[in-house]
Image: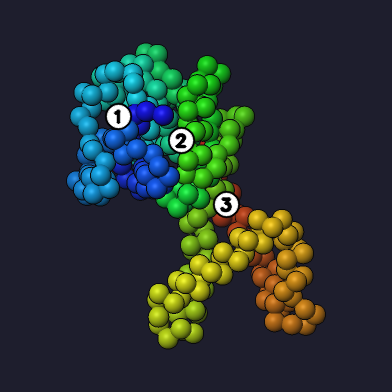
Amino acid sequence: MKGIVFFGAGNISQSIIIGLINNGFEKKDISFIDRNPLNNKIIKKMGIKPIDIRQLTKNNHHIILAVKPKDAIQACNEIALINNKPNLISVVAGIQIKTIKSAFKAPTIVRAMPITSSAYNKGITAIYGNPGSKDLMNYSKKVFDKVGISLFLKKENEIDNFTGLIGSGPAYFFHILKVYEKRVLQLSNGDKKLTNKIISTFLDGVSASVKDNVGFDEAIKKIASKKGTTEAGINSLISNNVLELFEKGILSAIKRSKEISDEY
Ligand SMILES: NC(=O)c1ccc[n+]([C@@H]2O[C@H](COP(=O)([O-])OP(=O)(O)OC[C@H]3O[C@@H](n4cnc5c(N)ncnc54)[C@H](OP(=O)(O)O)[C@@H]3O)[C@@H](O)[C@H]2O)c1
């Protein structure tokens, strides 16, 4: 696996780069192009070298396009001026292959939707490519499997569902965890380190049950007893439609991902 260039080196690129380095990917095989001085500083500190866009002429590398949707067309136009047949893996939410394709003469394009947990080897990445991009799809899978797990999607529009559900997913849980943080902080006399340790151990335990294939209802049954505290908590969550509202939030994210596709 040689030569990955991150075009756009912000949040998601940094997460993937940290994951790749921690999993034995050679730093010398990673480079980046980014206009933001702070992101330049952060990535250089990781031992990753910036390159000049003019170095994209040869086709001995793969480009990961990781700029915001509003900047994606402009970024593709800049790349196209130097290389009209790039091997390009776009992680940009909402922008379809046909739109990216139109900036180039003969590109090979794959879309991938990673998550920031890639930094901790807990990435989950969805990959989609048109027939004809099999080699690049397989290459993408090798890269993203290094930082977690990945799956191929059958249809491009499934990326919108994946984005709303998994791509944005960690943020929903961080949002919910704010309730835990507030209350655990009180129990631990404001000790932030202890609070984080309690919450991460708690989540590890939940994750271990899922890994153990314990069904969710079965797992709840093991904790709740008739007229006990858990039952009171769960009943309150049910009567307040918390699950429906949570799903509504996910559906809003999926809707937004589809809207972005229509905007570009
Ligand atoms: N963050 C996530 O969890 C996540 C997950 C999955 C997919 N994505 C997708 O990944 C993409 C990037 O997200 P992000 O959160 O990493 O964004 P970000 O932190 O804003 O990083 C994007 C970087 O690209 C730079 N850039 C934009 N256009 C450029 C150009 N023409 N030449 C050089 N550098 C350029 C930006 O510079 P400026 O700051 O100067 O604009 C910025 O440093 C988005 O399309 C998003 O949908 C993100």
Q: Residue furthest right?
A: 226
Residue identifier under label 3 = 250
Identify the secondary structure beneath mark 3: helix
Of the residues tagged 1 and 2, which is closer to the observer? 2
Mark 1 lies on residue:
74
Q: Alpha-carbon distance for marks 1 and 3?
A: 30 Å
Within 10 angstroms of label 3, few (less than 14), some, or many (20 or more) residues? many
Depth check, front residue: 261 or 159:
159
Q: Nearer the viewer, mark 3 or mark 2?
A: 2
Find out whether the residues at labels 1 and 3 contact each other: C-beta distance under 8 Å: no
Q: Amino acid at mark 3?
A: Ile
Residue 46: x and y in percent read 27, 48
Q: Earlier in the sequence, mark 3 or mark 2?
A: 2
Mark pair 3, 2: CA separation: 28 Å
Residue 16 visible in the picture: no
| Residue 157 point in image, percent of width and height | 57, 33
The residue wearing badge 2 is 143
User: Can you give x and y, in whole percent of width and height, for residue 133 in the image?
Assistant: 50, 20
User: Who's the residue at 56% across and 55% down the image?
Assistant: 249
Query: How many residues crowd around disc 1 within 10 Å: few (fewer than 14), some, or many (20 or more)?
Result: few
